[in-house]
Amino acid sequence: TASMTAGTNNELTITAYDSLGNVATAYTGSHDLTFSGLTNAPLGTVPTVEGTNQGTAVSISFTAGVSSTNAATLIAYCAESSKTVNVTDGTINSNSGHGLGLSVSAGSADNLHFLVGPSNTVAGVSISPSITVQVRDQWNNVRTADSSTSVTMAIGTNPGSGTLSGTNPRTASSGIATFNDLSIDKVGTGYTLVASSGALTTDTSSTFNITPAAAGYLVITGTASMTAGTNNELTITAY
């Protein structure tokens, strides 16, 4: 099949031909074939044929030049398009335009991942650059066809007892939720944010700091009563 979903089965049929384009009916029995052309998943999972990793020879049975039914089950794990699956048996192969053109789409939504996490910023000012969160499948492919998953952002570690403001939640577009106006009102060192969406595995950002804004007003404190001619030590605090 020319298209498939990551992690699902794709039953391949391999046919042997002679140099004139005739089916090589004498190509029969078990043959050790090596498959190539696909990429490992972002999580590192290697594509397989009959449970054998791509790049390692696997025994495939043939009858009259055609592989047996369900004898070459491909499982791909990386979401990618316009790839070509090729096969080699010694000196013969499918490399000259006879491979299988294949596109693999991401699997079901499984987890969230901060693509661009929060950075240090001033209290009350929108965090910049915009925070972006990927919606990924279990092999960490971004679900580029997903423009419906709603992602919620919340403060995780809250050293300043701050409040998060901004448009929240956000809906993913092509598998990415973008938060462009989030801010926190209280100063603190070591804040984190947590992205969540229903039953999906959450992700926690790296730590970041909220620093004071420019002074907006002054507050004077001191002893509320005093004797004429005595000292009253004042404290002036900028906010």
Image (cartoon, rainbow, N blue to C red):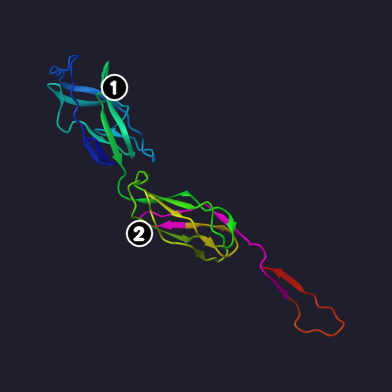
Picture coordinates of residue 37 (x, y %)?
A: 32, 29
Name the quarter where the C terminus is drawn: bottom right
Residue at position x 46%, y 61% in the image: 154
For residue 93, side relative to residue 24 (left or right): right
Which disc is residue 95 wearing? 1
Magenta-drawn stretch contains 199? yes
Magenta-drawn stretch contains 213? yes
Picture coordinates of residue 234 (x, y %)?
A: 77, 74
Residue at position x 30%, y 49% in the image: 108
Residue at position x 50%, y 59% in the image: 182
Q: First in sequence: mark 2 or mark 1?
A: 1
Residue at position x 38%, y 53% in the image: 172
Question: Looking at the picture, which amino acid does disc 1 mark?
Answer: Asn
Looking at the rendering, the stretch of residues picked out in magenta corresponds to 194-220
Decide which of 122, 74 is in the foreground and name it: 122
For residue 177, side relative to residue 79 (left or right): right
